[in-house]
Amino acid sequence: MINSRIKFRHLQCFLTVAQQRGLQKAALALSITQPAVSKTIKELEDILQVRLFDRSRKETVLTPRGEIFFVHAEASVNSLQQGSNLMQGSDCAEPVIRIGTTPTLAASFISHALQRFRAQAANIQVSVLTSTTNHLLTQLRERKFDLVLCRDVDAEQMIGLSFEYLYADPLVLAVRPGHPLLQDAVVRTDDLRLYTAILPIKGSVSRHAADTYMMAHGLPSPADFIESLSIFLGRSFTVNTDAIWFVPWGVVKHDVESGALVRLVLPATDRETSDRITLRPTGLMMHIGSALTLSMQTLINVIRQCALERRAEID
């Protein structure tokens, strides 16, 4: 039976402290004083008879027991909010679905999924914002997104969030039609150093895959290269020069199929073939226990179907 001493203000304060990772930030978000936040958290801990947070000078983080309670508290508050919305008739005009994603996925996957979704829910508004994975996760925790599509991340970044595997793209090399390397039946790997390489920025998931690719084929790090995550720059520069673009397959799939670009296939090595070098899995991330509207559930189902088709293409 639910402890009658637990009030909505306890749950709201607890969730805000967990999301803001600090008492002062939570106080600002709730428009109350820091002592009031501390008192409310102390009351909740006394009621539950557990310590919910570890406090330090820099931040306040959930204990293992606190993480367990967070999942259920968030689900409860979300359910109450959804029920309140229904009673007020707000289901007649569903809110905008807020999606966060990386620039690569926005161009290679989200666009296709949204086309299908709009065919099923033409009147639902969708907002798509792109950024780095770390920034997207921060915004998701602050509830500025309803869902995020990005690469898999480390376990410590997943607290309070769910990750559903969608697919994993192989890394490929793309060049313009008529590129000098396409003149021979078999590409000589030593010749790659003669041309500018377009590489993802250092520290990115795609850059790690590119470095692995080069190591697998015994290629030295290129001396002549451009670093960028811009799909527009990569595509434009590759089409108009003899550059070699190290890029996820999903980004250039339609360009290759239309003949705008050509996939450059290197001879397989004993260590690894180019088709087996993949990026970290792409997935769908949300708050654990998020209350889904009908339109959000429809969108998620469309995303799953598009991912299933993408996996079939890759395999």
Image (cartoon, grey):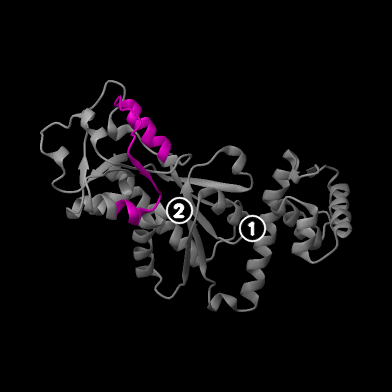
Span highlighted in magenta in the image: 207-235
Task: Write the residue at 63% across / 73% down.
Answer: 85
- Residue placed at 28% from the left, 55% from the top? 236
Q: Return the residue nearer the eye: 250 or 298.
A: 250
Residue 223 is covered by the magenta coloring: yes
Residue 66 place in picture, x, y as percent: 74, 44
Taking the spot 52% from the left edge, 51% from the top edge, the residue there is 285
Dot 2 surroundings within 10 Å: few (below 14), some, or many (20 or more)? many
Vertical comparison of 25 with 275: above or below:
below
Q: Which of marks 1 and 2 is nearer the N terminus?
A: 2
144 displayed left or right of 315 = right
Relative depth, front residue between 185 and 30 = 185
Residue 113 percent location from the top left of the image = 37, 59
Task: Inspect the image, locate mark 2, and give the three-letter code of the amino acid beneath it.
Answer: Thr
Which of the numbered marks, if any, corresponds to residue 142? 1
Where 1 sits versus 62, above or below? below
Displayed quadrant of residue 79: bottom right
In this view of the protein, can residue 252 be seen by the observer? yes
Identified at 43% across, 76% down, the residue is 123
Whether residue 1 can be seen here: no
Foreground of the two, 67 or 256: 256
Front residue (pair 52, 186): 186
Give the residue pinned by disc 2.
102
Identified by mark 1, the residue type is: Glu
Disc 1 vs disc 2: Cβ atoms closer than 8 Å? no
**203 is higher (above) or lower (below) than 286:** above
Q: In this view, does 143 lie to the left or right of 168?
A: right
Q: Which of marks 1 and 2 is in front?
A: 2
Q: Residue 241 carries which label?
A: none
Quarter of the image with the C terminus is: top left
